[in-house]
Amino acid sequence: MFLVTFLSSCGKAPEPLYQEQILALGALIDITIWGVAPDAAQQAADQIAEDFNHIHTTWHAWKPSPLTRLNAHLNDTVAYTPEAELLPLLAQAKQLSLNSGNLFNPAIGKLVAAWGFQGDEPKGPPPDAKTVAALVAAQPSMEQVHLAGNSVQSSNPAVQLDLGAIGQGYAVDVAIAHLRKLGIHNAIVNASGDIRVIGKRGTRPWRIGIRDPRGPGIIASIELQGDESIVTSGTYERYFDYQGKRYHHIIDPRSGYPARGTVSVTVVHNNATTADAASTALLVAGPAQWQRVARAMGIKQVMLIDEQEIVHIDPLLAKRIHFETKTQPRMKISAPL
Ligand code: AMP
Ligand code: MG
């Protein structure tokens, strides 16, 4: 997630471009629509704002929501039937989690909570080592989340669901589906850096900037068109500093501690939910394992920036990305994914 900017190219003639920014999911959502009358575009944007707010309240991990109710009932002896709208995303999350070898693991809600990231302002202190070790030893995973018909049940009491790693990507996919239903075929939805584009900006592709994980500004830009998503996970998105150390919000389920070695991962894929799960999983996988995990998840375009500021990138994405920094970063181009 987080701040991938939309770059407007400076066309001279006025064009039928509608842009609106809304606050939803606790974040800024940019909606850009091309080629539709302003009234219709505005109505569409309003409906999408409602979609985002609805998804936000449905999947909230710590304020009372259908998800917190499900979490409270996960270990009931009789399987619980949650709000029906939770089911498709839970099934999708389970599959993505299994594909990622549990590195994207939405069953680690207890760990995320122990680190204070289920709260509006995470500030530490970090949990003690014993607490972390116990939560890791309990091995919560989506394998133990059984989905049968309309009911959900976990065979491991350590499982608590936190869909924070795919919530925004999912909302972007829902928004794009909604736009299409309204007959809109050229648009961008950008939820703080989780982006999906459809169609074009007139005769040109859409041009997107990718945030520089080291500070303000962008590190690179890319042209997207047709139906593509670009999603970035970064350690700079949510963190707290405690006694001189920084702790970020992407937890390695194997250690129970914030993932090390990587500062951001950008994934290009047709579907934003999958790209969002993958960006989180690959950040956990790190410089040594990202290629294997990307292949297992069916992801073909990845850029990973490690703590040494080395850009690890696959050849397909390397070919289409333009670095916008003064000097070209150090790059390691992988084998094709
Ligand atoms: P993202 O920014 O998309 O990488 O998502 C990060 C959010 O997902 C965190 O704020 C947590 O709520 C949750 N989370 C943290 N670590 C993981 C993980 N390994 N797998 C799944 N969700 C995670
Ligand atoms: Mg993610």
Image (cartoon, rainbow, N blue to C red):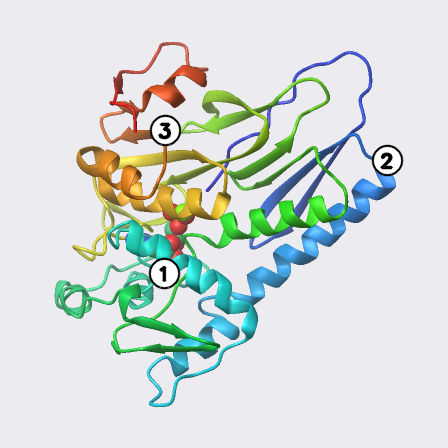
Q: Count residues near mark 3 (Cα–Cα under 10 Å), then give few for <14, some for 14-19, many for 20+.
A: some
Q: Is residue 200 visible?
A: yes
Examine the image and state in which quarter residue 35 appears: top right
Q: Count residues near mark 2 (Cα–Cα under 10 Å), then give few for <14, some for 14-19, many for 20+.
A: few
Name the kind of residue labelled 1 in the image: Lys
Are the residues tagged 3 and 1 within 8 Å (C-beta)? no
Between 246 and 51, the residue placed more toward the observer is: 51
Q: Which mark is residue 214?
A: 3
Q: Is mark 2 within 8 Å of ligand 2?
A: no
Q: Count residues near mark 1 (Cα–Cα under 10 Å), then give few for <14, some for 14-19, many for 20+.
A: many
Q: Which mark is residue 30?
A: none
Name the kind of residue labelled 2 in the image: Ala
For the residues labelled 3 and 1, the Cα–Cα distance comes to 33 Å
Between 174 and 133, the residue placed more toward the observer is: 174
What residue is at 23 percent from the left and 42 percent from the top?
285
Of labels 3 and 2, the one closer to you? 2
The secondary structure type at the circle numbered 3 is: loop
Give the residue at mark 2: 37
For the C terminus, the image quarter is top left
Left or right: residue 336 versus residue 5 is: left
